[in-house]
Amino acid sequence: MTVAPRAATPALLQLDAILGRLKGRAALAEVCRFLRSSFRSYRWVGIYRLDGATLVLDAWDGPAPTEHTRIPIGRGVCGRAAREGRTVVVDDVRADPEYLACFLETRAEIVVPIHVGPTVVGEIDIDGTTVGAYDASDRTFLEAVAAKLGAAVTVAASEGPPPA
């Protein structure tokens, strides 16, 4: 179990505090930093915003930036999650033909859509270095996180393009 039940509630309360004091892209960046620092299996954390038919990276935290700052929704695991409006867990990215390679050490990925009402407005993308790194506890926890992020993603969209 990656996200222990005793860790989920305090983490969600901390996210409420972050979202209460920060807005838009600043809030998203702090959420990425918090998730990565709080959960060891979250090696790289990014939040993408849906802009038309393209996912645009608005915030991230990890050891290195990704080259995939813009992803058409027709491509990759991230595109699949946005197209289908559902969480996608990939136990071994090397076995998934849709995976867009970012880092050689990535072995698992979980992508969770962010909705405002029924509409997908963005997603959380998390990479891990262990095959099978994410389970039902991650899905449940990250879906609860995503449910809190719709307003921040909407504000980020009004802030203009993210810095290069």
Image (cartoon, rainbow, N blue to C red):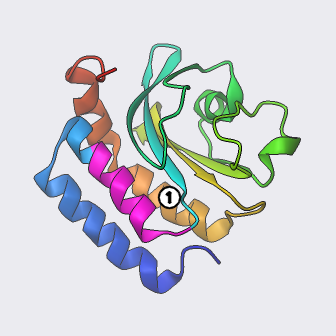
Q: Is residue 97 left or right of residue 52?
A: right
Considering depth in this image, is 90 or 53 the residue closer to the camera? 90
Residue depicted at x 65% and y 32%: 84
- Name the quarter where the C terminus is drawn: top left
Q: How many marks?
A: 1
Please tell me whether mark 1 sits on a helix, a strand or a loop: helix
* Residue occupying the point 53% across, 14% down: 53
Q: Is residue 35 magenta?
A: yes
Residue visible at 70% across and 30% down in the picture: 100
In front of the other: 163 or 151: 163
28 relative to 140, above or below: above
Q: What crowding class fits label 1: few (fewer than 14 Cα within 10 Å), some (14-19), or many (20 or more)?
A: many
Q: What amino acid is labelled 1 in the image?
A: Leu
Residue 86 appears at what percent x and percent y? 62, 42
Q: Position of residue 124 (x, y in %)?
A: 49, 44
Is 24 placed left or right of 121 in the picture? Answer: left
Q: Extreme right residue here?
A: 95
Q: For residue 47, what is the image quadrant?
A: top left
Magenta segment range? Answer: 28-40
**Chief secondary structure of the magenta portion:** helix
Please name the residue that numbered disc 1 is placed on: 142
Q: Residue furthest top?
A: 52
Residue 154 picture location, percent across and down: 28, 31
Figure check: 26 above or below 164 = below
Q: List x then y, in percent, for residue 24.
A: 22, 37
Quarter of the figure that contains the N terminus: bottom right
